[in-house]
Image: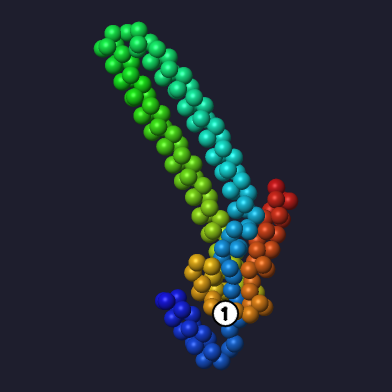
Amino acid sequence: MKNIVYVVLAMIVLSSCEKQAKIGYVNNGTVINDFQEKKDLEAKFQLKEDAFKKRADSIGKAFQVEVQQTQAKAQKSSQKKAQELMGGLQQKQQQLQQQMQYEQQLLTQSFQTEIDSVIIKVKDFVKDYGKKNGYTYILGTTDAASTVMYGTDENDLTQTILDALNGTKKEADKKE
């Protein structure tokens, strides 16, 4: 509701100005999600996630073998020795779980940091695009939080920005 009030207020102020403001808008979700750099980042982290899952599965299977061996050994041992063996397994299981959770958190944090960097890059690009092309405002909208209730197709810069962003990445790739 606040956003609607701000947009209406901005429109009133803009319409009262002598100079006609140049306004455009972008669909933030489309620009971010279709930005090739973000897609590449997601693919990179999917590979890391898959490798992590394989490693975790391998560790889990190795631990299950160890559990079976320890249980067989415990059956042949005294009750006290069996309790010690099983207690050691429980400790090891907790350590393995903590290690896997820690590694998963690191992977998630790393991904989030890189995604945040991509979002900042897009925002900076849109800002520079607006300055270079004489826009007074470039508004952002998404399906979840629509700040642009209506805009003509000619003011929709989504595809233009996306093409320019992806073109910039392609040019950067060629330079490398």
What's the residue type where badge 1 is placed?
Tyr
Q: What element carries label 1?
A: loop
- In this rendering, does residue 40 appear at all? yes
Relative to residue 157, is residue 30 depicted above or below? above
Say few, some or many: other residues with alpha carbon within 10 Å of mark 1 (under 14 / 14 to 19 / 20 or more). few
**In front here: 146 or 78?**
78
Please give the name of the residue rendered at 58% of the width and 43% of the height, measured from the top-left corner: 46
Where in the figure is residue 174, as x and y percent of width and height? 73, 51
**In front here: 63 or 141?**
63
Q: In which quarter of the image is the N terminus?
A: bottom left
Residue 60 placement, left or right of 84: right
Relative to residue 116, is residue 130 depicted above or below? below
Residue 34 placement, left or right of 6: right
Q: In which quarter of the image is residue 6?
A: bottom left
Q: Residue furthest front?
A: 75
Residue that carries the numbered disc 1 in the rendered image: 150
Please give the name of the residue rendered at 33% of the width and 16% of the height, measured from the top-left corner: 85
Where in the figure is residue 148, as x and y percent of width and height? 54, 76
Please give the name of the residue rendered at 56% of the width and 63% of the height, measured from the top-left corner: 29
Q: Quadrant of residue 124?
A: bottom right
Q: How many labels does the image show?
A: 1
Where in the figure is residue 159, as x and y percent of width and height? 67, 67
Please give the name of the residue rendered at 56% of the width and 44% of the height, measured from the top-left corner: 45
Q: Which residue lies furthest to the right in this view?
A: 174
**In front here: 111 or 98?**
98
